[in-house]
Amino acid sequence: MNNEPKASYHITDFNDFNHVYIENKELDFPEFEKIMNDYILSQPKETMKFQECWIEDKLMEAVEVRIVQVNFLDHNTSNYIRLWGAKRTDDGQVLKMKVDALDFETKEVVYERQLA
């Protein structure tokens, strides 16, 4: 029973996302929050517009893993900026984090960087 979702959340309202997952620390992924704050949320609001957040808790090889993806629209480049991370729930070990940019028109990845 690998990769079975235990819980899945989809948020499209920034105020809900900010209140529940950032202010109330329900994201439970401090490394992800730091990168998001440093890289994306520090940008002027007219530059980066929150689009959505996906959070999924799933069992992978008998270990619970939290996977988070937050998408923003960068008005300066007309790219979707996707910040993605995964961590083990039991010990908090970050498995992977990356940021990429997806061209809105062509749907091609124009930038990708591994963060952890």
Image: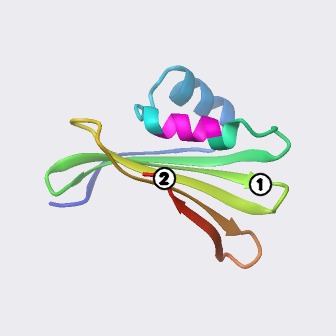
- Which range is magenta? 32-38
Residue at (86% x, 42% y) in the render: 46
Nearest to the observer: residue 71 or residue 34? 34
Q: Residues within 10 Å of mark 2 (few under 14, many from 20)?
A: few
Q: Distance from label 1 to label 2 (Cα)?
A: 19 Å
Residue at the disc numbered 1: 74
* Between marks 1 and 2 in the image, the one whose residue lies nearer the viewer: 2
Please determine whether, in this image, residue 23 is positioned above or below residue 86.
Answer: above
Instruction: Give how far across and how far down residue 67 sits, in percent.
Output: 39, 49
In terms of secondary structure, where does tag 1 sit? Answer: strand
Nearest to the observer: residue 63 or residue 5? 63
User: Left or right of 115: which side holds 48?
Assistant: right
Residue at the disc numbered 2: 115
Residue at (66% x, 68% y) in the render: 102
User: Left or right of 113: which side holds 15?
Assistant: right
Nearest to the observer: residue 56 or residue 103? 103
User: Left or right of 112: which side holds 102?
Assistant: right
Instruction: Give how far across and how far down residue 5 sits, in percent.
Output: 30, 52
Instruction: Give how far across and how far down residue 15 sits, in percent.
Output: 67, 30
Sequence-wise, which precedes: disc 1 or disc 2?
1
Residue 98 is inside the magenta segment: no
Residue 35 is inside the magenta segment: yes
The label on residue 92 is none
Quadrant hosting residue 7: top left
In terms of secondary structure, where does tag 2 sit? Answer: loop
Q: Amino acid at mark 2?
A: Leu
Q: Amino acid at mark 1?
A: Asp
The prevailing secondary structure element of the residues shown in magenta is helix
Q: Farthest top residue?
A: 24
